[in-house]
Image (cartoon, coloured by chain):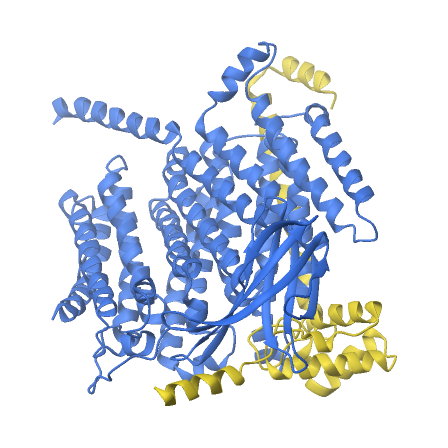
């Protein structure tokens, strides 16, 4: 019964979205206040209806209601509760429902907290937001309805892919979706601004928090996915340049560019048209990301053939929102003239360079991701574009960004002097070179990747510290500056954390790639072997029964200089319902290295296949990502946004006060 | 219950091998290092975007063993790759060649970067000229001349 209610709520939400998409927009064009006012209650209603609908679907999963087709296909009574809940969005239909739920939540947030926005802009933003909502709701109801029943409910379901039964992956999609959908706000603001034909500093200030929020969720989502791949797939890879990963990485790159260009619009009123374009492209990548992951379009052209309705609908949505926005952009971009002026050496130029590098990097990933599709359709060549391509084509952009970042961050607005900035950075440069030389001297006969990465990471880290320290002014005495340092605005700390996080990620990735030790062997129980500085013993292997799997669990002891460092239990699991095995590596986490153990098959001549990895700096990758997200959070909480909001409120009140007698 | 147990045992027995197996590893470390590097360049043709080094699939193991045989027979890296392409098609290469239309893939990034830099250069010049113009407009001709002298341009 509750499930039926959810279904009705879903259909009702579509009706509400259609109203919200049209009435406020017409109202804004005509200047009818009461029509514009429809947007707010509609946004709230849409959110509540979708929340009810999603709750109903979750309820069906939790109670294992096998009269629902979706539950039969994706759940099982033996599954732990966490994965029953996560199963709600662990499939195409449910994930789409989660997507629109988040979309409507963002819309409701604008309705509830965006009271300081000009009425026309708010009505238009909410209307564009509802158009996206309506398109997706239509897609769900007509091609991917999660509430379809089966005529003869089976006794049990078919389970969830065991690889997905993992805490890291349970929360990976919601975060990604929060990011994707957050970018829809930037898109809605961009389209609303294009309709109004006006982009100014205030607009940038309103857009930036949404972009920041989206970026920070995307960062967390991508980091979670990468962390999951690292510990779950059994050999500690953290990034594969798989189309699905690229689909989430491209919006991140563009969102990063957008964050930076929105600052330029806010502070200097230049790069307006470019910022609008970035907002549109960012959401375009979000849309394609959402669809690619669930429809499998990029893995093969045949995904369209097997399900033409879905494929066509997806293409239609994409064409409508991208085509519409870009047409509007072409018509209106000319109206957005730049105000600010700046010299070639200035922070404006540096941020423009940052945008170019990020956008072209995203373009490279895009071309590499769709190339197999293009080659097959246009040239009849069946080929692969894998990690080796991206590992050549992508890093140059990141290296350039890392080199330029500290310089750009220290350049003043309008006009700067390169010499002066470089002089301030002399300490950072010396430190970076010193670390590189040290690493080069310590390592013997390994690639130069390690020292170079360490130098770049140190340069970014030390450069960021210099940046923050410079913000305290000069000549005030160390004690005073320290005091000021701690009282720097949160936006500065946010920048510091985000940039520093990038430096740490760079060190993590290069350190892991350059200095990893791998050992593959047959280990006999009780016979120790040496890997790097560690002596490892396979103590025993036994069978263990899990809640919905059977495990072959090893007990292994790692010693260093005779002392026990860790006792680890790598596993191989079999999930009988899904008839699928998984490897569960066991990892001894550390700041300087991870010890990563994997158990394989029993060998014919006795003993077990065992893989051992020492992975230096592995946790710096995710630690850096957490710092970056934290930077986003700090920046988001800066009082600049709250003060700005207050200022508009005061201004509006004043205008209202002035206007009153005249009427 | 017994049947379930039998099923489970059958499943356990049918477990796919785990990526690179100890028995595959070559004795000569230099040759093995080359084999591992080449493994990263070859796709497991039945998997979803995995190379043969990471893949657990049976065919990945077959290709890994074949690759090592070729290396032991004295093939160069390029010869091994050519051999694989002949056998499994261009699809097996994780790094596409730069031949024919693929050239587009390889030059797309650099060309786009140059184009973007060119456009940005024009934009920055326009913005800095605008500053000169505005500054000039606000100043009297003598002041403007003096300013230009000071700026040394």
- Residue at the right extreme of this rendering: B74
Image quarter in which the N terminus of chain A is found: bottom left
Residue A112 at x, y percent in the picture: 22, 42
Residue A462 at x, y percent in the picture: 65, 32
Q: Residue at x 28, y 48 (%)?
A: A124
Q: Would residue A445 be found to the left or right of residue A83 on screen? A: right
Residue A646 at x, y percent in the picture: 29, 27
Q: Nearer the viewer, residue A268 or A365?
A: A365
Q: Residue at x 80, y 39 (%)?
A: A437
Q: Would residue A507 be found to the left or right of residue A58 on screen? A: right
Query: In yellow, which chain?
Result: B
Q: Is residue A20 above or below residue A71?
A: above
Q: Quadrant of residue A537?
A: bottom right
* Residue A615 makes an appearance in the image: yes
Query: In blue, which chain?
Result: A
Residue A452 at x, y percent in the picture: 74, 45
């Amino acid at each position: 019964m509750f499930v039926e209610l959810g279904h009705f709520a879903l259909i009702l939400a579509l009706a509400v979205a259609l109203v919200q998409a049209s009435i406020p927009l017409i109202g804004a064009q005509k200047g009818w206040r009461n029509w514009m006012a429809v947007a707010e209650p509609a946004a709230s209603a849409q959110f509540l209806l979708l929340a009810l609908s999603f709750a109903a679907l979750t309820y069906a999963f939790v109670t294992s209601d096998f009269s629902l087709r979706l539950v039969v296909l994706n759940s099982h009574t033996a599954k732990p509760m966490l994965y029953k809940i996560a199963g709600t969005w662990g499939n195409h239909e449910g994930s789409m429902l989660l997507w629109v739920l988040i979309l409507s939540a963002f819309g409701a947030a604008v309705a509830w907290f965006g009271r300081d926005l000009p009425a026309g802009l708010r009505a238009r933003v909410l209307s564009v937001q509802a158009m996206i909502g309506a398109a997706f709701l239509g897609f769900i109801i007509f091609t991917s309805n999660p509430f379809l029943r089966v005529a003869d409910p089976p006794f049990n379901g078919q389970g969830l892919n065991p690889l997905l039964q993992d805490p890291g992956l349970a929360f990976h999609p919601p975060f990604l979706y929060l990011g994707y959908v957050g970018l829809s706000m930037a898109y809605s603001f961009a389209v609303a601004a294009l309709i109004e034909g006006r982009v100014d500093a205030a607009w940038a200030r309103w857009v930036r928090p949404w972009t920041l929020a989206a970026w920070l969720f995307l960062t967390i989502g991508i980091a979670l996915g990468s962390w999951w791949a690292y510990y779950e797939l059994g050999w500690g890879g953290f990034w594969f340049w798989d189309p699905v990963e690229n689909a989430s990485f491209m919006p991140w790159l563009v969102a990063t560019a957008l964050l930076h260009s929105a600052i330029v619009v806010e502070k200097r009123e230049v790069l307006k048209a470019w910022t609008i374009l970035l907002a549109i492209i960012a959401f375009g990548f979000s849309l394609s990301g959402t669809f690619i992951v669930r429809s499998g379009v990029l893995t093969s052209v045949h995904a369209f053939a097997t399900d033409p309705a879905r494929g066509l609908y997806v293409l239609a949505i994409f064409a409508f929102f991208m085509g519409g926005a870009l047409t509007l952009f072409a018509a209106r971009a000319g109206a957005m003239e730049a105000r600010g002026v700046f010299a070639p050496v200035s922070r404006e130029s540096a941020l423009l360079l940052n945008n170019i590098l990020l956008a072209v990097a995203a373009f490279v990933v895009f071309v590499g991701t769709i190339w197999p599709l293009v080659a097959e359709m246009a040239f009849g060549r069946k080929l692969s574009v894998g990690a080796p391509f991206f590992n050549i084509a992508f890093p140059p952009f990141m290296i350039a960004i890392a080199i330029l970042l500290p310089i750009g961050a220290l350049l003043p607005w309008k006009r700067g002097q390169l010499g002066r900035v470089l002089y301030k950075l002399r300490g950072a440069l010396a430190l970076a070179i010193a670390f590189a030389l040290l690493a080069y001297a310590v390592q013997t006969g390994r690639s130069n990747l390690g020292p170079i990465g360490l130098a770049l990471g140190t340069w970014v880290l030390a450069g960021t510290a210099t940046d923050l320290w410079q913000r305290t002014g000069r000549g005030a005495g160390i004690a005073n500056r320290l005091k000021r340092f701690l009282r720097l605005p949160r936006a500065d700390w946010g920048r510091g954390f985000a940039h520093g996080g990038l430096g740490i990620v760079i060190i993590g990735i290069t350190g892991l790639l350059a200095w990893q030790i791998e050992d593959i062997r047959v280990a006999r129980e009780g016979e120790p072997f040496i890997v790097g500085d560690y002596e490892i013993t396979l103590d025993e292997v036994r069978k263990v029964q899990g809640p919905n799997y059977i495990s072959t669990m090893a007990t292994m002891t790692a010693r260093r200089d005779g002392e026990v460092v860790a006792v680890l239990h790598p596993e191989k699991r079999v999930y009988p319902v899904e008839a699928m095995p998984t490897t569960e590596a066991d990892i001894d986490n550390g700041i300087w290295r991870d010890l990563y153990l994997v158990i394989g098959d029993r060998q014919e001549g006795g003993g077990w296949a065992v893989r051992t990895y020492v992975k230096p700096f592995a946790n710096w990758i995710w630690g850096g990502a957490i710092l970056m997200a934290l930077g986003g959070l700090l920046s988001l909480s800066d009082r600049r946004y709250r003060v700005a909001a207050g200022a508009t409120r005061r201004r509006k009140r004043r205008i209202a006060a002035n206007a009153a007698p005249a009427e | 219950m017994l049947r379930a147990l039998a099923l489970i045992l059958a499943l356990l027995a049918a477990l796919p091998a785990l990526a690179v197996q100890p028995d595959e590893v070559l004795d000569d470390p230099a040759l093995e290092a080359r084999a591992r590097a080449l493994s990263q360049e070859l796709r497991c043709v039945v998997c979803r975007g995995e190379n043969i080094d990471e893949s657990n699939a049976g065919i990945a193991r077959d290709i890994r063993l074949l690759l090592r045989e070729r290396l032991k027979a004295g093939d160069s890296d390029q010869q091994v790759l050519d051999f694989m392409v002949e056998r499994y098609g261009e699809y097996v290469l994780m790094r596409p060649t730069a031949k024919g239309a693929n050239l587009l893939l390889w030059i797309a990034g650099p060309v786009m970067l140059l184009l973007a830099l060119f456009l940005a250069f024009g934009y920055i010049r326009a913005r800095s000229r605008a500053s000169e113009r505005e500054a000039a407009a606000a100043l009297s001709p003598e002041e403007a001349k003096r300013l230009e002298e000071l700026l040394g341009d």
